[in-house]
């Protein structure tokens, strides 16, 4: 089976995301500062496969030249593939792997609510919001939008490095 290079870059982005997500889960750091920023670290690291995919497209398909529109199209295509795969994994992760995250945040909401003398209704409202936010579907949606948005912005930023136009002859 021969996979398209752009799709392989999307798979690499997905692999990076899964590796960091599982590392945070298995080291029980998802509730610490490192775990909280692991999502941002992942978004930054997705720039490397995106760069590789766009550069490959420029060098192999377009003969070493690419304009900003072609950079954006290539980057968004890679990002769409990656965000769909990552959203699918995120849904599975919060449905079957990391089911303790909501338990932790509910306990934290109760503890902080009691510490701040919140009423039982206010605590229950906070728990309801947390339960909705950490539902597998909501987390998958956040991952979908986050990866696609970041990929689009990174594609635009990478265009400053990757755009090459052919030299115009003076004849």
Image: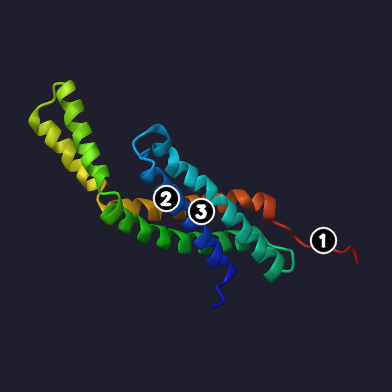
Q: Is residue 103 above or below residue 139?
A: above
Q: CA distance from mark 2 to mark 1?
A: 37 Å
x 31%, y 57%: residue: 91
Q: Earlier in the sequence, mark 1 or mark 3?
A: 3
* Residue receiving disc 3: 151
Indicate which label's residue lies in the foreground, 1 or 3. Answer: 3
123 sits to left or right of 3: left
Image quadrant occupied by the N terminus: bottom right
x 42%, y 62%: residue: 85
67 sits to left or right of 13: right
* Residue receiving disc 1: 167
Asked if the residues shown at circle 1 and circle 3 are in contact, with their CB atoms under 8 angstroms apart, the answer is no
146 sits to left or right of 53: left
Residue 29 pos. (x, y %): 38, 38
Q: Is residue 45 above or below residue 81?
A: above
Q: Which residue in the rendered view is the most extreme toward the left? A: 120
Q: CA distance from mark 1 to mark 3?
A: 29 Å
Image quadrant occupied by the C terminus: bottom right
Provide the secondary structure element on which disc 1 rests. Answer: loop
x 19%, y 37%: residue: 106
Within 10 Å of disc 1 (Cα), the crowding (few <14, some 14-19, many 20+) is few
Q: CA distance from mark 3 to mark 2?
A: 8 Å
Q: Which mark is residue 146?
A: 2
Q: Which mark is residue 77?
A: none
Provide the secondary structure element on which disc 3 rests. Answer: helix
């Amino acid at each position: 089976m021969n996979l398209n290079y752009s799709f392989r870059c999307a798979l690499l982005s997905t692999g990076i995301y899964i590796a960091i997500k599982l590392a945070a889960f298995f080291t029980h750091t998802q509730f610490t500062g490192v775990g909280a920023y692991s999502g941002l670290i992942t978004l930054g690291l997705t720039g490397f496969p995106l760069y590789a995919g766009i550069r490959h497209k420029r060098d192999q398909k377009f003969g070493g030249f690419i304009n900003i529109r072609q950079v954006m199209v290539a980057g968004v295509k890679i990002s769409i593939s990656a965000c769909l795969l990552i959203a699918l994994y995120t849904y599975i992760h919060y449905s079957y792997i990391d089911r303790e995250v909501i338990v932790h945040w509910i306990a934290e909401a109760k503890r902080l609510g009691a510490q701040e003398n919140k009423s039982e209704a206010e605590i229950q409202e906070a728990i309801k919001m947390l339960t909705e936010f950490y539902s597998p579907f909501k987390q998958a949606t956040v991952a979908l939008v986050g990866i696609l948005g970041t990929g689009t912005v990174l594609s635009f930023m990478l265009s400053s490095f990757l755009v090459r136009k052919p030299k115009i002859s003076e004849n």
